Image: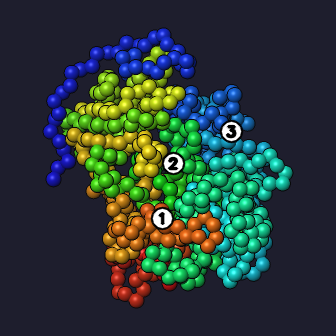
Amino acid sequence: MSDAAPPLPPAAPPRPAPASSGGSSSAALPPPSPAAQRWQRPASCSPGDPYLDWALATGWQGFPPMHKPADPALLWVPLLAPRGRALDRALARLGTRLWLNPESPPDADWLTVWAQAGAVASLRKSLRGCELSQPLPVDFARARAPSPPTARRGKPPPLILGSIDHGGAFLNAVFRAPGGSKSCRILSYWDQASLPPQDPDTPWQVAPAGYGRELQHAALQALHRRCAGQVAKERALYQALGLDKLLAAAAAEQPDHATHVLDTLAGLPARRRHPANAKPSSLDAAAHAPLLLVSVPRGLDGQTTGAACVAQILDALHHILREAEALSPQAAVVVNISLGALAGPHDGSSALEQAIDELMRKRPRLLVVFAAGNNGGDLLNDPTSGTNAAGVLAPRHSARLSWRLQPGDPTDSFLELWCSSVGGATRPAKAAGPALQLRVLEPLRSPWITLDEQVDLYQGQRLLGRLQQQQLSKAGRSRAQLSLAPVRGARGGLPAGRWLIELRNSGELPLEVEARVQGDLSRWTDPIPVQSVLVEAQGLQLGRAGSLNGLATGKLPLMVGAAHTEDERDSLYTARRKPSDHERRLARAVADEGPLAYGLIAAGVLSGSEARMGGTSVAAPVAARQWANRLARGGLPPKPEDWLDFLSAEQDRGRSMSPSRSKRRAQMTALRPQG
């Protein structure tokens, strides 16, 4: 069955839009009206990260005021950047206007570079592969030194477990050593979102990366001793430590995401047998393992841009590796990441995915496990609420996408388009170049743009939108993006409702096109939805681009989808591959008791409490715990690409089964808590 679509009737050609003049960016001006908004003439497109381009073009207006100093040029911005001569030259040129994370391994090909906002434009020209991440408050002067190797009595642990998540009730008794001990197994808790108070008596420290607040093992041990197993003291300590969100979750009897995930991954055994338990009811290697927990910031109040916390995730991984290698250099390290993203290339080429692949390749004892994603059922819940679309656009054919902006959306909105020439790698470079043309038809018609062009939408001097397309490779790969300012709020004024985008293949080769909406604020829990969605596609198919986690499509990490304990069928929401996907490292594990019984049971915020939570966020640590127990017995795959073969063969010990058949069985069988 062909994905090609018949040509759409041509629309009337747009008239050139005159350059706008006059106006002011003052907040005192009334909101702009559609009649006052004008697309400019097409211009050359700057290569590099479109999100960084948008932040520079809008003067960092979409970032929280509390994170911006009086002089915007002194705002510190994190970038994921490749190591090499270009970075060395930039360091020599910009000096103290740059900061490198001292925990980045010396052999890492990617690292986090913090740059003052005034230096970002210059740095971007030098580091073409850099990508924007979420700015946070920093205090490089107070950052503690990275941990040196630790002298340890007795045999070093064979297994260390890490979790990169949101939150974390580190005083919960499930994270103590087995046998009734009050010894805390968490070696470090790093909350990346906030700096510690200027108080000499606080147990918090600024983490080595120069941002966030950290509790090291000695401080955590002291806090556990002060709790003495009393829930009232836990509450008081969380309050004294400024962890109000944990207390709010406890008061509402809601799960804390990181607490539930870490307990599933490595908590002490369940106190009672129950079919919905997320963890085993008997001791295993994971329940003895030292732990490292990093809390990555959620969407920050006042942050309206598409900046994700990709640099913070890489810093968290570097921190876990540094602490683990300081304690036990030969230990297997399993890191669970139950975080995700909708957008991105989904082919392993993002900066974070390349960085994780490189770390796993250079460190054979490192296994990174991702949640596969929870957007597999979007179109089943609402056929007009898609987050992606895809298809093959035949030569001289067109397609149209209807993208809906929500009326109450206070955030910027982003639609990504990824384009590849089908068969382009076998043609001459000139012929293989992508030939996608695109424009906005409604509500404000733009001129057509082609490769390496952009067109801006202005109201007076206010930049409200940018449509751009840039070539990624001569083998026929390009990226386009429509970036729009908020509908409401201080920077608002764009029309809500349908934005109609037209795509046209003007070349001689078919084009494979994927459209992806960037994730926004929570769609299903807010009283007023703010997430933009794809409502209709002509010439493409909604949902066909697949719904796998956009952070997890690298070559080496394992991904875990969700299934029911009751019947081992896929959970409705679990991420789906796209039809053209190559075989990925995707396994399955239980995350729900059954089709009508959502979630599994693990620790709540306070010791002794329980909470039910579901999603691939739960499936991932269920699988990771089983794999960690296997690694504690020794042995490693012959190469990083063989992780799933190696771990699946252990499941099938005693069966006569080839590695490829064993892998297929692992993908079909839902892993579940053992014991």
Q: Are marks 2 and 1 in contact (CB under 8 Å)?
A: no
How crowded pointer 2 is (Cα within 10 Å; few <14, some 14-19, many 20+) is rated as many
Residue displayed at 30% across by 27% down: 442
Q: Regarding mark 3 in the picture, which secondary structure is present there? A: strand
**Please, is residue 576 above or below residue 473 in the view?**
below
- What percent of the width, then of the height, locates residue 610? 55, 70
Question: Seen in the image, is 546 located left or right of residue 330?
Answer: left
First of labels 2, 1 by sequence position: 2
Q: Label 2 amino acid?
A: Ala
Q: In which quarter of the image is residue 286?
A: bottom right
Residue displayed at 48% across by 64% down: 613
- What percent of the width, then of the height, locates residue 290? 66, 72
Residue identifier under label 3: 98
How many angstroms separate mark 1 from mark 3 (CA)? 41 Å
How many angstroms separate mark 2 from mark 1 (CA)? 31 Å
How many angstroms separate mark 2 from mark 3 (CA)? 19 Å
Residue 351, numbered label: 2
Q: Can residue 323 be seen in this view?
A: no
Q: Do the residues labelled 2 and 3 touch (CB within 8 Å)?
A: no
Q: Label 3 amino acid?
A: Leu
First of labels 1, 3 by sequence position: 3
Q: Regarding mark 2 in the picture, which secondary structure is present there? A: helix
For this rendering, which residue is in front, 181 or 157? 181
- What percent of the width, then of the height, locates residue 415? 38, 38
How crowded pointer 1 is (Cα within 10 Å; few <14, some 14-19, many 20+) is rated as many
